[in-house]
Image (cartoon, grey):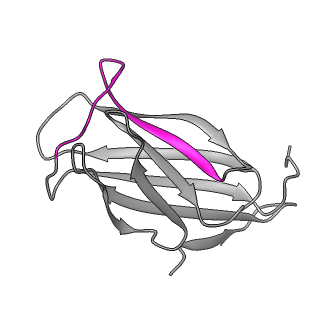
Amino acid sequence: MKTLSPVRSEGVERVLVSAKFRPQGAGVPIQDSGVGSLTVVRNGSAGEYLITFAENYGLLVSAQATIQMAAATDVVPQFATYSATARTIILRALAAAVPTDIAANANNSISVAFEFTTTNVNPR
């Protein structure tokens, strides 16, 4: 099931794609929502996740991420390279500016939300 929601705006139609996944340390993340609209895998490096979109949704307008941790910790999300052609974006979990794996825990998760236009026209 795709998590697609048209967003009403003047001019160009927008689409919201969202998901939630649970990091598993060096293992494969468990995706809780957003299945069908994107996939998440560990990118081979500590604390880096490769997000692949199921479709080319158009121009990426906004990318948001939040990290939920079971224990108080200093880990923040940072998006890196986005490729519209490959339909991918890299997300890092950073602790003191260093990509860091997040341990497997039912209460550790990352939520992401992306806003796209339905065309590649910049809606300035």
How far across and how far down the image is residue 16, in percent? 61, 63
Question: Which residue sits at x=13%, y=53%?
Answer: 105
How far across and how far down the image is residue 91, in percent? 46, 40
How far across and how far down the image is residue 75, in percent? 28, 31
Question: Which residue sits at x=21%, y=50%?
Answer: 108
How far across and how far down the image is residue 3, in percent? 53, 73
Instruction: Give the farthest residue toward the front.
Output: 44
Instruction: Give the farthest residue toward the bottom.
Output: 1
Q: Is residue 98 magenta?
A: yes
Bounds of the magenta span? 87-103
Question: Which residue sits at x=63%, y=46%?
Answer: 62
Which quarter of the picture shows residue 106?
Answer: bottom left
Where the C terminus falls, by quadrant?
top right
Q: Is residue 106 above or below residue 85?
A: below
Q: Nearer the viewer, residue 117 or 32?
A: 32
Q: Is residue 59 left or right of residue 87?
A: right
Question: Which residue sits at x=60%, y=66%?
Answer: 54
Q: Nearer the viewer, residue 118 or 88?
A: 88
Q: Is residue 38 left or right of residue 107?
A: right
Q: Is residue 100 above or below residue 49?
A: above
Instruction: Give the farthest residue toward the left.
Output: 71
